[in-house]
Every structure is written in structure tokens, then in C-alpha cells.
Amino acid sequence: MSINFKRIGQGQPVILIHGLFGNLDNLGRLARYLSEHFEVISVDLPNHGLSSHIEEFDYPKLAAEIVELVTNLGLNQCHFVGHSMGGKVAMQLALDFPHLVKSLVVADIAPVTYSHRHTHIFDALNAIDLTTLANRSEATAIVTNHGIDAGTAQFLLKNLAKENNAFVWRCNIANLATNYESIIGGLTGCNTFDGATLFIKGENSDYIISEHRPQIMQHFPKAQAKIIQGTGHWLHAEKPASFNKIVGDFIAKNLD
């Protein structure tokens, strides 16, 4: 198993974990901001970016893969920041390997089971025939014709690459679809993480709602919360200065 990662800066280590269909560049602005004071390791999750494709894709497996990377890099305790699906990976890691977690930041996701929010995205991506695809503009047209907005289409098609004059997907779309129930599922086990934890919610996003509070507090009894006004699920991209400062300040308060 090989996890692709990017390592910048010096200081206490911070691990950044992206969401579904993403890659390590998604939190790039946060990485550059934090690297002024910390060592930042941005990862491509398995089945994403330049990391290996795997068959088993659930949160305990993904958490274990990140722990293996941390061990191979010779790190001890780290700060973990995860957005969306990456937030669930970070939460599962904190529950399963609490001794490795200095602090935990979860961006716009809760430890709960969600509805099928991405069916239209899988349909749109599967509508692209890579064997006949002429160019990226054609791919964009196909995706937007399936009702995907332009910004989301641009994000999704970052997974489209060209190798040996043929288009390929960086992310393992077939496997993600097969394991979608695990992806939208809640966390595994009944452990708790008693360390410093911050949930950051986009004001206009419904990924974290008041009904999720009992499950959040059950697993993360010391959880704090921040809301970034005027943002949705992509809060880190919509208001990066606010998001970066909140994350950086929280980590800085939990160095000891």
C-alpha cells in the first residue's frame, strides 16, 4: 500500500485529510498557512489522487492506513485536520488510536450516517466514456449536462488525467461506488476521544445540524464548535482566511 503525500514546514506535525473525490491539493491553502509554524503532511487517501487503489474502503481501514504512514514517517503525536469524508477518517483515527492524536479538527461533517447525496455525481462521472473522450471540455459538458454546477464539475474533473495519450481517472470511481454505504455510514465502534476536538461548520451547510450533537458529544466529550458565516460545505475554499485562522489558532492552543 502506498499513500502519496506532500510534506512542508517545520514544527509539530499536522496531518491534512481531504474529502470524497478530492486530493491533497484541496487543503493546499491551509497547508501553506500552517507551514509557517508547523510541519504539514497533506495526504491523498487510498483510491484518490496518486495513492494506491484498494478494495477494502471503510473508516477503520483508512484510519489504519494513515497511522501506518505516520509510523513510517517516524512521527509520534500529530494534529489531525479532516474535511468531509476526511473528517470521518480523522475521527475514526482518533477513536481507534487516541495516543497518536494531539488535537483533532473536523470540518463540516459529523460522526453520523448520511443519505445518498452523491448518486447524481456517480451517474455524471460514469456517463463519461474515457475510451472516446476527446478533451476536457467534452467531459465538462457531459458532467454539467447531468445537473452538476460548474464549480463542482471543475472540482470533480481534477481527477481526470491523461496518460499515454489516453484519459484515466485518478480516483477509483468504481470502488467508491461499491463502498458508498461505508462512506456515508457512521463511525465504527463506541470508543471516545477525550482530547482537544474542534468541529467547524459552514453556516449554510446541513452536514452538521443540531440533531447530530448527541452523537458528537458521545464520541468527543470535549468537542468545541465554530461556525463560519456565509459558507457552505466548502467552507475552507469559500472563506479560506477565516478557516485557516480558526484551525491555526486551535492547534496553537493545543501544543503541550
Image (spheres, grey):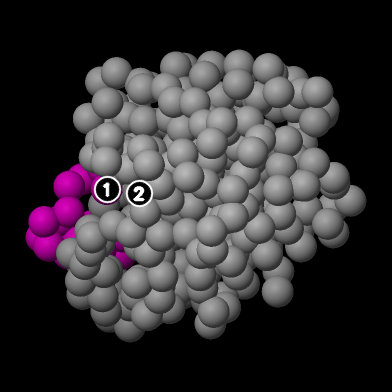
Query: Which quadrant holds residue 214?
Result: top left
Drawn side of residue 77 relative to residue 115, left or right: right
- Residue 114: which quarter of the image? bottom left
Q: Kindly tell me whether residue 50 is visible in this rendering.
A: no
Which residue is found at the position 85% from the left and 59% from the top? 72
**Quarter of the C terminus within the rendering:** top right
| Residue type of the residue flagged with mark 1 | Thr
Span highlighted in magenta in the image: 135-152
Looking at the rendered structure, the secondary structure element under dot 1 is: helix
SS at badge 2? helix
Viewer-side residue, 176 vs 113: 113
The label on residue 152 is 1
> Residue placed at 30% from the left, 64% from the top?
135
Magenta: main secondary structure equals helix
The image position of residue 16, as x and y in percent, is: 60, 42
Instruction: Please name the residue shown 62% across and 44% down the image.
Output: 193
- Please say if the residues under marks 1 and 2 sit with CB atoms less than 8 Å apart: yes
Reply yes or no: does residue 146 show up in magenta.
yes
Q: Is residue 181 above or below residue 190?
A: below
Mark 1 Cα-neighbour bin, 10 Å: few <14, some 14–19, many ≥20: few
User: What is the x, y in percent for residue 245?
Assistant: 54, 16
Q: Is residue 9 magenta?
A: no
How far apart are the two marked residues, 1 and 2, measured between alpha carbons? 5 Å
Residue 126 spot, x, y in % from top left? 26, 75
Q: Residue at x 80, y 31 (%)?
A: 12
The reply to whether residue 110 is visible in this rendering is yes
Please name the amino acid that badge 2 sits on. Answer: Phe
Residue position for label 2: 155
Q: Which mark is residue 97?
A: none
Residue in the foreground of this view, choosing between 48 and 201: 201
Residue 5: x, y in percent? 68, 52
